[in-house]
Amino acid sequence: MQYQLHYWPTIQGRGEFVRLALEFAAIPYSDVARLPEDEGGGEAALYKSLDRAHPRTIPFAPPYLKAGDLVIAQTANILLFLGRRHGLAPEDEGGLLWTHQVQLTIADFLAEVHDTHHPISVGEYYQDQKAEAAKRTAAFRKTRIPKFLGYFEKVLDRAGSDWLNGKQPSYADLSLFQVVEGLRYAFPRWMHKHESQYPKLLALRDRVAALPRIAAYLKSPRRLAFNEDGIFRYYKELDRAD
């Protein structure tokens, strides 16, 4: 079966967490919106596809994954599905739920990352809420990044192995890699000063980057560049070392 991933064609965003899992597990998939328009690609087709994806289980927003007759939306939910089906999570119930729990915590963090540049309204441009964004981001840098990264560091320390669940990478390991990459893009000054406080998280990032399929993906045109339309955005005025 070739899966169909439906997500915005020009950004990494939340869809990138799904792409990393698909690439690592060598799962055949089509990144539908990135296809030519005459093959059903493009943003306009993506908007239309949301309502047509499934007559009953309608996705709220991308990303969503089509797997035969199944339509699975929400990043953590998609990864739970892929993890169970493709060996990207432990088979036992406790391990499966633990991996899902870590991914949900990452989802919470991503929501806070997004709100640094859109603290008032998603429907307004960053330029229309810059003062509020500066205040929100100052608190995010001071308290929220250390809180989340400190938690991930503790989780990795207590894992007692190279990966969250033992000898094999899980989708949550791949997602933690993406978190570090995103923060390095959006807050390079802060990360340059503080990231050494999280050595296990950085070591995990390096191990994921060295995985052969991930390394190949990162060098390929399938890996979109970070930009100021995604979750992790770089605005010089929001990036400080304090």
Image (tube, rainbow, N blue to C red):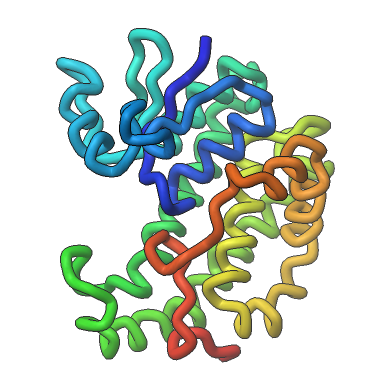
Q: Please name the residue shown 18% across and 71% down the image.
A: 124
The image quadrant of residue 40 is top left
Judge from the rendering whether residue 117 lies leftward or rightward of residue 199; answer left or right. Answer: left
**For residue 173, above or below residue 137:** above
Taking the view exactly as shown, the residue that stands out farthest to the front is 38
x and y percent of residue 128 in the render? Answer: 20, 82
Judge from the rendering whether residue 221 lies leftward or rightward of residue 59; answer left or right. Answer: right
Judge from the rendering whether residue 14 lies leftward or rightward of residue 212; answer left or right. Answer: left
**For residue 229, above or below residue 39:** below
Q: How many marks?
A: 0
**For residue 134, above or below residue 185:** below
Q: Please name the residue shown 38% across and 63% down the image.
A: 229
Q: Please name the residue shown 51% across and 15% down the image.
A: 2
The quarter of the image holding the C terminus is bottom right
x and y percent of residue 241 in the render? Answer: 60, 89
Q: Pick the residue in front: 55 or 177.
A: 55
Q: Pick the residue in front: 213 or 182.
A: 213
x and y percent of residue 35 in the render? Answer: 42, 34
x and y percent of residue 81 in the render? Answer: 48, 22
The image quadrant of residue 108 is bottom left
Q: Please name the residue shown 22% across and 18% down the image.
A: 54
Q: Pick the residue in front: 28 or 183.
A: 28
